[in-house]
Image (cartoon, helix red, strand yellow):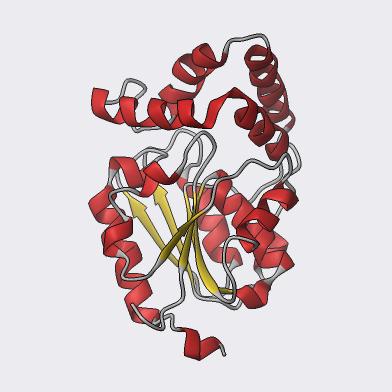
Amino acid sequence: MTGTVPVVLVPGMLCDAGLWEDVRGALGHPVVDVDLSAPSIGGMARQVLAATEGPFVLAGLSLGAIVGFEVLRLAPERVAGFCAMSTNAGAPTARQREQWAALDRLTAEGGFAEVVTERILPTMFAAPEPPAERARTFLAMANRIGPEVFRAQLAAQATRTDAHEALAAVRAPALVLGGGADALCPESFHTAIATAIPGAERHTLPGAGHLLPLERPAEVAALLGDWLRRFSFRKELHA
């Protein structure tokens, strides 16, 4: 892996490095994991930029990809390649803001476990009641994140802006992945992102839900690994 740029893996809300456990080994690049704990998208983007020096490939899921949109705006020269998974480049709706505020109130009142198991978990996979092993993996990540960071992530979500126009300026190779059964981010979101980024490559995993690296790790690893190999992301190309 000498000479290859690192792949910075940016997880979604209530997720950590465990999201990528069955994917990272197939990438053929050094990997840097980033935790998102700032209360704004701009602050989270700066966390990503501080995680490594020089150029990098950014792969983000959901909130992680939304942060990636801001990284592309702030420092496009640092991003050698961009992979967006299970995400939305649109601005928050009024209903989303209401939902996030309600989740924040419940969490502040001590209802973090209820929020995670009853409100969040049913939207993470293709079925509202996922296989027990997948549920345990997600709940373990959520518990490691904890209520305070979760509240910061909710606050950050509310600072999002529409990124579609800015994505038209992206010149780095881009890969857009989505699940055909994603309850949060339907295929239309990914079509819009791939259309906005010149030359972006798009794939839909039929029957997959929101957390693609947990639900379909082999397919995500194959798609991402093949894309990385085809574009030969190496430091000397960006010297």
The answer to whether residue 82 of the structure is visible from this angle is: no
Foreground residue, 83 or 33?
33
Where is residue 60? Give x, y as percent: 50, 54
Viewed as shown, does residue 141 lie left or right of 10? left
Look at 62% across and 74% down and name the residue there: 78
Foreground residue, 86 or 195?
86
Q: Quadrant of residue 27?
A: bottom left
Q: In this rendering, is residue 78 above or below 209?
A: below
Q: In this rendering, is residue 26 above or below 159?
A: below
Look at 55% across and 26% down and name the residue there: 146
Q: Quadrant of the C terminus?
A: bottom right
Q: In this rendering, is residue 6 above or below 211?
A: below
Q: Quadrant of residue 171?
A: bottom right
Where is residue 13? Give x, y as percent: 54, 37
Q: In this rendering, is residue 208 above or below 105?
A: below
The answer to whether residue 16 of the structure is visible from this angle is: yes
Where is residue 174? Give x, y as percent: 49, 69
Look at 72% across and 29% down and name the residue there: 97
Q: Quadrant of residue 124?
A: top left
Where is residue 12? Give x, y as percent: 51, 42
Q: Quadrant of the N terminus?
A: bottom left
Viewed as shown, does residue 223 lie left or right of 91? left
Viewed as shown, does residue 87 lie left or right of 42? left
Tally of numbered tags: 0
